[in-house]
Amino acid sequence: MSGVRHCVSPNFGPRPEGTEVDLAVVHSISLPPGQYGGGEIEQLFTNRLDWNAHPYFGEIRGMEVSAHFVVARDGGIVQYVSTRDRAWHAGRSSWLGRENCNDYSVGIELEGLEGETFEPVQYERLADLLIALLRRLPLRSVAGHEHVAPGRKFDPGAGFDWPALIDRLGWPGRYFPEAVRGTR
């Protein structure tokens, strides 16, 4: 896909042998919470975040996390981990009875705060990215972090417009969690 910037995160590992990558997990992130456009997400994903630069960073001190992709508020996309590798984005999770979503998913972070709205260009670029991924991977599901780690995670949250994404993609509802299919 054109227009994707690459920045390598050290926070990844190998997928289990023979794993089929069939899930995309949508997240939201902003660092510090509610602030956009700075370099803090990249710094976090590359283990260069100054933990003392903001009081909130003390709460996440030492975290080693990543995602395969981040879609910024302006629609820019950065890839941090190859889709052949396992990014560290979902943590303790399960989808359709399968544990450890990181093993078989692609993690996509949208720059935003859980519960708040996202920019129209983010939906456009997310749809473009998912379509490009479907050409290379046997994706069968797209879910939010809140769906794969219910009760533990709440992103992308109520501000994420699942019907807008579903309409933009034109994919059958079976790709999406039942909870969001009914909102269409």
Image (tube, rainbow, N blue to C red):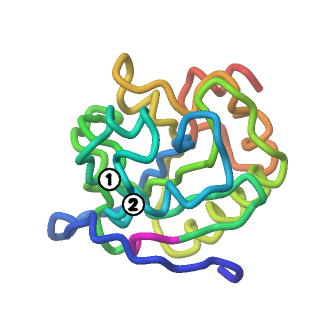
**What label sits on residue 17 in the rendered view?**
none
Q: Nearer the viewer, residue 72 or 51?
A: 51
**Mark 1 falls on what kind of element?**
loop
Whole-percent x, y for residue 118 in the image: 74, 39
Residue designated by label 1: 65
Give the prevailing secondary structure in the magenta stretch: loop
Q: How many marks overall?
A: 2
Q: Quadrant of residue 19?
A: bottom left
Does residue 2 sit above or below 106 in this rendering? below
For the N terminus, the image quarter is: bottom right
Q: Which residue is mark 2?
A: 45
Residue occupying the point 70% across, 27% down: 116
Against 165, residue 114 (above or below) is: above
Quadrant of the image for the C terminus?
top right
Query: Is tag 2's residue or tag 1's residue first in the polypeptide sequence?
Result: 2
Q: Quadrant of residue 100?
A: top left
Q: Residue at point 26% right, 65% down?
A: 12
Left-right relation of 1 to 51: right
Say whether residue 80 is magenta. Answer: yes
Magenta region: which residues?
A: 79-83
Cβ–Cβ under 8 Å for marks 2 and 1:
yes
Rendered location of residue 170, percent (x, y):
77, 50
